[in-house]
Amino acid sequence: MIKLMIFQDNIIGSIIGSAIATFFSILVWVIIEILKKWNERHTLKKNIRKLYKQLTKEESEPYIAIDVADLIDQISKEKILKLLRFDLQEHEPGYVLINDIFVVKVLYKQGTNIIEIDERKKNMPYQYENPTKNVETKKSFLEYYKEQCDKEKIKIK
């Protein structure tokens, strides 16, 4: 009789111990998944802000198109297209982003470093190589960029 009670206590203890271990394993897995998603979102926000900062520069830098293309790659083409609501036409080497309002060209190769923003209705392209011409187009695009980020709850500072 005593052996039976001890045996039952061991079985019940094993079941309870296994249930507790399983619960904590699931809890740890859930916490890790939450942290992964938070880290991805944090990295996305950071890179979106970096891209915006690059695009707000007043003067053309020698490798600005390469820097912008690298940031687009870091963010991932799919995410940047979804965020800014653009379609992508890959252009070797670089990108052409198109939507109903803007056409943004980011082209680079040896001897070429072009970022051009064109507002389709106005047909007044802004080029970073000529930063004093058609500045309204750049301002309009940056405003559009901020609006799209606000929709995705990404604050641009």
Image (cartoon, rainbow, N blue to C red):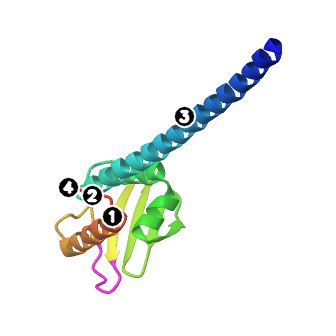
Residue drawn at (54%, 41%) of the image: 30
Q: Kindly indicate the quadrant of the structure image that contains residue 5.
A: top right
Amino acid at pointer 1: Cys
> Would you say 129 lies left or right of 93 here?
left
- Range of magenta residues: 119-125
Query: Is residue 67 at all visible to an observer of this figure?
Result: no
**Mark 1 or mark 3, earlier in chain:** 3
Query: Is residue 138 at all visible to an observer of this figure?
Result: yes
Q: Which mark is residue 59?
A: 4
Q: Name the residue nearer the viewer: 72 or 131.
A: 72
Mark 1 residue element: helix
As measured in the structure, the alpha-carbon distance from the residue carrying label 1 to the one carrying label 2 is 7 Å
Residue drawn at (60%, 35%) of the image: 23
Q: Are marks 1 and 3 in contact (CB under 8 Å)?
A: no
Q: Residues within 10 Å of mark 4 (few under 14, many from 20)?
A: few
Amino acid at pointer 2: Lys
- Total marks shown come to 4
Amino acid at pointer 3: Val
As measured in the structure, the alpha-carbon distance from the residue carrying label 4 to the one carrying label 2 is 24 Å
Residue situated furthest front in the rendering: 1
Q: Which mark is in front, 4 or 3?
A: 3
As measured in the structure, the alpha-carbon distance from the residue carrying label 2 to the one carrying label 3 is 30 Å
Q: Position of residue 141 (x, y in %)?
A: 28, 71
Q: Which residue is mark 1?
A: 149
Q: Which mark is residue 28?
A: 3
Residue drawn at (27%, 79%) of the image: 124
Q: Residues within 10 Å of mark 2 (few under 14, many from 20)?
A: some
**Mark 1 or mark 4, earlier in chain:** 4
Mark 3 residue element: helix
Q: Which residue is mark 2?
A: 155
Q: Name the residue nearer the viewer: 22 or 129.
A: 22
